[in-house]
Image (spheres, grey):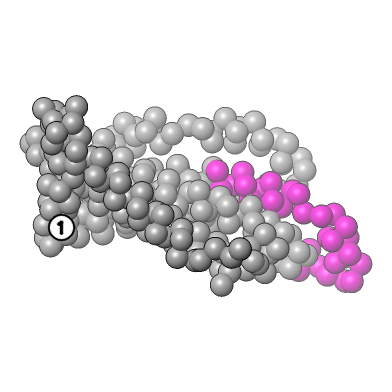
Amino acid sequence: MTRSPLVPPLVGAAGVVAALALWEWSATAGPLSGSPLPPATAALAEAARLLGTPATWTALGDTLAMALTGLVLAIVCGVVLGVAIGTSPLAMHATRVPLEFLKPIPPIVILPVVVLVLGPTLGMGVFLVFFGCVIAIAVQASAGVFDTDPVATATGRSYGMGRAEVLGRIVLPSALPYIGTAVRVAAPTSLVVAVVAGLLGGGPGLGQSLLLSQITGNQPQLFAYVLILGVLGLLVQGLSQWGERRLLHWHPQYRKQVV
């Protein structure tokens, strides 16, 4: 029996409505009625009000600018570094331990040093996003290049392909699924790091707006910013998945998913 394509969105929408209803009940008549948690209706109304102000859109633009700029730089540098490492077995084994050591280190660890050097600026946020994404992309890219079928590369050489042609027509297409997965995971990470740059580093954007709402004790506004960030995260995640499917539409893993 074929399932209607409307079922997943309807189920998702029902889950959102149920979560908001539970939030509303918990804050008004439930166990959290006496806590600082505002009702869902108050947070939604405040979010609608904030979206009508230029300051919110300026903060949103700053956050997206930090996230996208840092992510693009991380993709370019990560892919170049990954290809350089993956094409050399010696470099692959020599860099495995340092890269795996750096990969789990969160950008917040170096935040005080970066703020000290660059100050609470847009550039500080871009650097943190870059640091938070580039290692994972480089590791995935190098793994994809290293795992390229040696028979395919040998066949290309037997047909007279040069080193650059083998790299462009065989190695990189083989590594693209690895790179696509890394970018899809890094996209929401870049948004999180950009918010942290404002929340803890004093940089511009929605993170700074969150911090100011917390300091002033404006709970409806605080949760309104959380809702806005949640919707923004869903959009970023959805766009990254759509881009991955479109870029890799030729790959068997994605061919059936493209409509």
Tag count in the figure? 1
- Identify the residue at image location x=83%, y=60%: 153
Q: Amino acid at mark 1?
A: Ala
Q: Is residue 140 magenta?
A: yes
How far across and down, in percent of the image, does residue 216 sit?
8, 36
Please report the bounds of the magenta region as a residue range: 136-165
Along the horizontal axis of the image, is 188 left or right of 51?
right
Task: Answer yes or no: is residue 78 visible.
Answer: no
If the image is split into quadrants, where does the C terminus sit?
Answer: bottom right
How far across and down, in percent of the image, does residue 185 sit?
50, 48
- Residue 258 lies, with reference to residue 186, above or below; the image says below
- Residue 124 lies, with reference to residue 243, above or below; the image says above
Q: Nearer the viewer, residue 107 or 47?
A: 47
Name, please, the residue furthest toward the front. 1
How far across and down, in percent of the image, does residue 59 sit?
21, 54
If the image is split into quadrants, where does the N terminus sit?
Answer: bottom right
Q: Nearer the viewer, residue 95 or 35?
A: 35
- Identify the residue at image location x=59%, y=36%: 99
Determine whether the residue tagged by mark 1 lies in a helix, strand or loop: helix
- Identify the residue at image location x=60%, y=54%: 179
Q: Is residue 247 magenta?
A: no
How far across and down, in percent of the image, does residue 132 sit?
45, 42
Residue 131 figure quarter = top left
- Residue 115 lies, with reference to residue 258, above or below; the image says above
Q: Nearer the viewer, residue 34 or 238?
A: 34
Task: Answer yes or no: is residue 107 visible.
Answer: yes
- Identify the residue at image location x=13%, y=30%: 33
Circle 1 residues within 10 Å: few <14, some 14–19, many ≥20: few
Q: Nearer the viewer, residue 101 or 18?
A: 18
Helix, strand or loop: magenta stretch: helix
- Residue 80 lies, with reference to residue 221, above or below; the image says below
Q: Which residue is mark 1?
A: 48
